[in-house]
Image (spheres, rainbow, N blue to C red):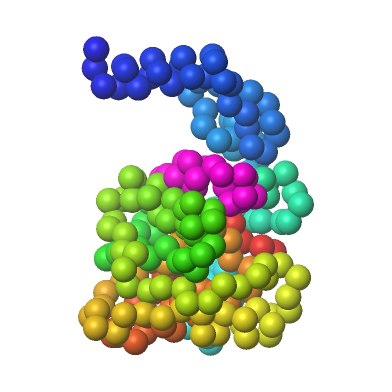
Amino acid sequence: MRMEQRISFWHRLLNLIAPQACVICGARLAIDEQVICVSCNLHLPRTGYAANALDNEMARRFWGRIPVERAAALFYYEAGSEVSNIIYDMKYHDHPEIGRVMGRMAAEEFANEGFFEDIDLMIPVPLEKKRQRRRGYNQSMEIAQGVKEVTEIPIREDIVVRTTFDESQTHKSLSQRMESVENAFRAHEDINLNGKHILIIDDIVTSGATVCACVKALMNCGDIKVSVMSLGMAK
């Protein structure tokens, strides 16, 4: 039996024993569906930003703060909406596989727009060590792994670390968010990234403060180009 056939057999058997549900609507997933059903995928509030990654609402959030080559999110995120279950289940209900599946989906769509051209490496926004130990994984890394499966762009976890534990940013103002993460990251300055084009991977972009703080730390590693990709973008 070929490997693909064995995987398909076990996937079908698992689906019979423990049916999987769409994280958005709760409907039972078909054998060939993962994480979200076809209907919810069809109605996912996509941003379309990858088609104009140089100038869109997400890219403009970084203008004047950090130099960004491209920026795109797969869908619009609104706290409390059914679509927000993608992020909530991934982060808080121990479902890292959601990150990989959605990362692959986003990468396949973005690749059609040339979004990944000349990207040298990906850096997922790191979690502070205590938070990652408690959660068991970094959701941004899971997303990056899904992107890598499609693009084969290497991932680097050893360049930048998060040095502070920050509480939820949801109810903070822009100035409060910027202040809380201003010195939250540290890059290994002995690593030379001069001339590299780096893709920062995050789960959600809201004010952009976290990404900006991460990129500013990376600027100590040389003259770099930066692009940003996320699953969600808060309106």
Residue at image location 29% in from the left, 84% down from the top: 189
Is the N terminus in the top left, top right, bottom left or bottom right quadrant?
top left
Q: Can see residue 2?
A: yes
- Is residue 45 in the magenta section? no
**Taking 5 as reference, is 65 above or below it?**
below
Q: In the image, residue 208 lies at what x, y percent? A: 58, 74
Which residue is at the front of the view, 99 or 195? Answer: 99
Residue at image location 29% in from the left, 56% down from the top: 153
Which residue is at the front of the view, 232 or 180? Answer: 180
**Taking 137 as reference, is 27 above or below it?**
above
Q: Quadrant of residue 10?
A: top left
Q: In the image, residue 130 lies at what x, y percent? A: 51, 65
Q: In the image, residue 26 lies at what x, y percent? A: 69, 31
Which residue is at the front of the view, 101 or 42? Answer: 101
Residue 148 as seen in the image, left or right of residue 127: left
Residue at image location 69% in from the left, 64% down from the top: 235
Which residue is at the front of the view, 163 or 107? Answer: 163
**Taking 85 as reference, is 185 above or below it?**
below
Q: Can see residue 230?
A: no
How many numbered marks appear?
0
Residue at image location 68% in from the left, 26% down from the top: 27
Magenta range is 87-110
Overall secondary structure of the magenta stretch? helix
Residue 91 as seen in the image, left or right of residue 220: right
Q: In the image, residue 105 lies at what x, y percent? A: 46, 43
- Is residue 108 in the magenta section? yes
